[in-house]
Image: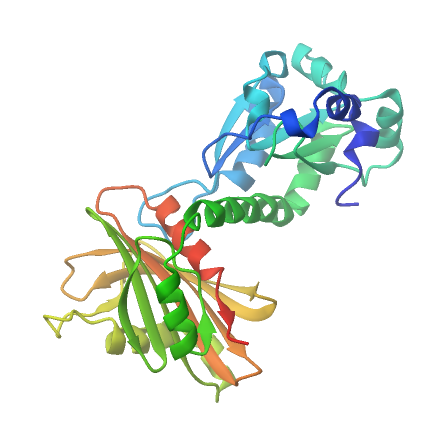
């Protein structure tokens, strides 16, 4: 069972809801991309902690430098104060076989009934709660009879665990980006193209022509770009040729307005796999997600990109939508996450 009622398992859940009225709850805090882990120090240093780091701190594919999917901050349950409890993303980890002082504190959160349930039903290993200690908070509880048993459960369900926090961070990023919009541009897109997309305040239109739309945000030496390309869908084999499809698009449309010989292409490096392809769902449709590195063909600038390729059955169009960023010498994970959030607002015009 993937999700069960945490109230049945954790003694503090019902008490918390009774003690703190929703309207008086503090607002959750914490950087997007960070997770607070409440667990035993010994388990953090051994197999359980290693497995959690493998799942949640693996390097993000397609970045020029290694950056983790999430930044993990472990805290002892004995030091879990009121401030730490307001973290936006939290994970509590406990196994019944551990007898350390930290684990005993964590087990104290469990009711006797819940311990019996965990012992009898090994399918129970995780639960999700929202707004437990703060508004806008999500908490994942991971538990099991033994550390070995829980490690295996995390291995098997790693994609579900990752996607929970990835979706959570995307939603937070969308709310942050779209506190205000470029409504005039959004209206023009809807009128001139077969789709609509939310455009954050401060972004500008770079190109708009039949079958192609490009917006960008410039901030000093940092740059974020999103473009949408579409054409009649005639060949299913294009899903096996996404990198080449991208090359055709960027060579034609992503050219320097003043120096026409300069255009964006893929960055090829012998020491690095520069294109990562994954089958996924985008707005409920089959899609190919692509992550890789781009560059200007004179090697003057480059960075990472993320894209989705999918078909509109209603209009029989194939879409290639991409976000790419440049930030020389800077970390790029958050910038790429923000353009991905812009892509997530795409929808066909009714």
Residue 71 percent location from the top left of the image: 46, 34
Q: Is residue 244 left or right of residue 16?
A: left
For residue 322, what is the image quadrant? bottom left
Q: Does residue 275 appear anywhere in the picture?
A: no
Observer able to see residue 98: yes
Question: Image height check: is 96 above or below 337?
Answer: above
Question: Would residue 37 appear left or right of 156 to someone viewing this image?
Answer: left
Residue 157, percent across and down? 67, 46
Nearer to the camera, 127 or 204: 204
Q: Quadrant of the C terminus?
A: bottom right
Which of the 4 quarters of the picture holds residue 2?
A: top right
Residue nearest the observer in this picture, 58 or 175: 175
Image location (x, y in percent) of residue 118 = 83, 31
- Residue occupying image coordinates x 73% and y 14%: 104
Quarter occupied by the N terminus = top right
* Residue drawn at the location 35% of the way across and 48% of the way down: 335
333 horizontally vs 101: left or right: left
Task: Give the residue drawn at x 31%, y 64%.
Answer: 215
Q: Give 253 or 301, whichever is nearer the viewer.
A: 253
């Amino acid at each position: 069972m993937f999700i069960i009622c945490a109230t049945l398992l954790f003694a503090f859940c019902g008490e918390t809801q009774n003690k703190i009225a929703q309207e008086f709850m503090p607002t959750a805090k914490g950087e997007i991309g960070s997770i607070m882990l409440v667990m035993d120090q010994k388990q953090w240093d051994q197999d359980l902690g290693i497995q959690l780091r493998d799942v949640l701190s693996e390097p993000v594919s397609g970045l020029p430098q290694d950056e983790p999917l999430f930044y993990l901050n472990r805290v002892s349950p004995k030091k879990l104060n009121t401030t730490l409890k307001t973290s936006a993303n939290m994970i509590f980890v406990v196994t019944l076989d551990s007898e350390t002082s930290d684990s005993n504190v964590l087990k104290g959160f469990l009711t006797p009934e819940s311990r019996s349930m965990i012992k009898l039903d090994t399918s129970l290993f995780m639960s999700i709660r929202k707004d437990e200690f703060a508004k806008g908070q999500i908490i994942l509880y991971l538990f099991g009879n033994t550390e070995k048993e829980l490690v295996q459960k995390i291995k098997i369900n790693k994609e579900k665990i990752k996607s929970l926090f990835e979706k959570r961070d995307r939603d937070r990023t969308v709310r942050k980006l779209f506190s205000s919009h470029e409504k005039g541009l959004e209206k023009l897109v809807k009128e001139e193209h077969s789709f609509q997309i939310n455009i954050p305040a401060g972004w500008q239109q770079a190109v708009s022509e039949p079958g192609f739309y490009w917006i960008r945000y410039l901030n000093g030496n940092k740059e974020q770009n999103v473009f949408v390309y579409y054409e009649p869908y005639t060949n299913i084999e294009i899903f096996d040729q996404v990198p080449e499809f991208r090359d055709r698009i960027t060579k034609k449309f992503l050219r320097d307005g003043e120096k026409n010989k300069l255009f964006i292409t893929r960055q090829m490096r012998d020491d690095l796999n520069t294109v990562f392809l994954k089958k996924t769902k985008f707005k409920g449709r089959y899609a190919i997600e692509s992550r890789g590195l781009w560059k200007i063909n004179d090697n003057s600038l480059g960075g990472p990109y993320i894209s989705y390729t999918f078909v509109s059955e209603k209009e029989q169009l194939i879409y290639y939508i991409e976000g790419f960023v440049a930030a020389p010498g800077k970390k790029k994970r958050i910038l790429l996450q923000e353009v991905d959030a812009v892509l997530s607002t795409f929808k066909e015009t009714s």
